[in-house]
């Protein structure tokens, strides 16, 4: 009887060894850092307008673009990942300028879509009620109203006089220079800054 079970298929030890080998290969792939540049990769648009990539002989029909340092260094160390739920990294662009101009523009377009962050040009009003702040501002995309939580990390100092404001829906807004606002506008922000 025991002999029949042994011949029925791979034993448990064989499966554990296979899993161990697969995990080891996957770990090595993850730890290997691949830099993408004009010499080893080519970005292009698909018929549907997505960003695709060819690295050596491998084709990726659609890729995602992620900034490693979105606020402080948006043109260096750009992570290119597979466009599925795992978002496995394919490689890094060390500097966007290392790619041809047309490919730089395609990648910058993807960055603008992923990291959409209107710039606040004018603060018309900010009211606080019941733990929320109700903002009415003018951005580089026009007039806008949004709501933030009072306190917490809704308004974050990025550097110097530069701030990022995140509303209750996760949308981000940039205030590039607090002192470019008028005295009256800055006074409206006293509770936050």
Image (tube, grey):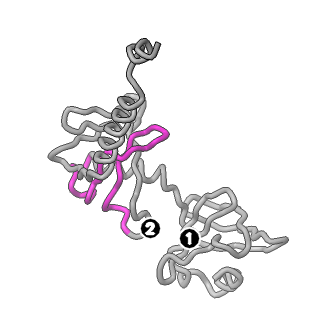
Q: Earlier in the sequence, mark 2 or mark 1?
A: 2
Q: Do the residues labelled 2 and 1 touch (CB within 8 Å)?
A: yes
Given residues 118 and 148, the one toward you in this image is: 148
Q: Which label was assigned to residue 192?
A: none
Q: Quadrant of residue 11?
A: top left
Above or below residue 129? Residue 63 is: above
Q: Residue at point 53% right, 60% down?
A: 117
Q: How far apart are marks 2 and 1 (CA)?
A: 9 Å
Q: Position of residue 139 (x, y in %)?
A: 58, 64
Q: Where is residue 91 in the image (x, y as percent from the top left)?
A: 29, 49
Taking the image as shown, residue 95 lies to the left or right of residue 165, namely left
Taking the image as shown, residue 90 lies to the left or right of residue 98, namely right
Given residues 144 and 66, the one toward you in this image is: 66
Q: Position of residue 62 (x, y in %)?
A: 38, 36
Residue that lies at the very extreme toward the left in this rendered image = 39
Above or below residue 15? Residue 34 is: below
Q: Residue at point 35% right, 32% down?
A: 61
Q: In which quarter of the image is residue 134?
A: bottom right
| Residue labelled with disc 1 | 164
Q: Residue at point 34% right, 37% down?
A: 22
Chain part drawn in magenta: 73-102
């Amino acid at each position: 009887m025991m002999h029949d079970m042994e011949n029925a298929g791979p034993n448990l030890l064989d499966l554990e060894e296979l899993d161990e080998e697969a995990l080891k290969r996957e770990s090595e792939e993850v730890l290997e850092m691949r830099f993408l540049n004009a010499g080893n990769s080519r970005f292009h648009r698909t018929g549907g307008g997505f960003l695709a990539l060819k690295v050596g002989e491998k084709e990726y029909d659609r890729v995602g673009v992620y900034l490693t340092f979105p606020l402080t260094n948006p043109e260096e160390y750009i992570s290119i990942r597979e466009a599925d739920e795992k978002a496995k990294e394919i490689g890094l662009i060390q500097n966007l300028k290392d790619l041809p101009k047309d490919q730089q523009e395609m990648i910058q377009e993807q960055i603008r879509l992923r990291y959409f962050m209107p710039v606040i040009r004018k603060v018309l009003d900010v009211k606080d009620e019941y733990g929320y702040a109700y903002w009415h501002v003018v951005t580089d995309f026009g007039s806008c109203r949004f709501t933030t939580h009072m306190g917490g990390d809704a308004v974050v100092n990025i550097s110097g006089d530069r701030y990022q404001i995140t509303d209750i829906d996760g949308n981000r807004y940039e205030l590039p220079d607090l002192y470019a606002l008028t005295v009256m506008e800055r006074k409206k922000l006293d509770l936050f800054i």
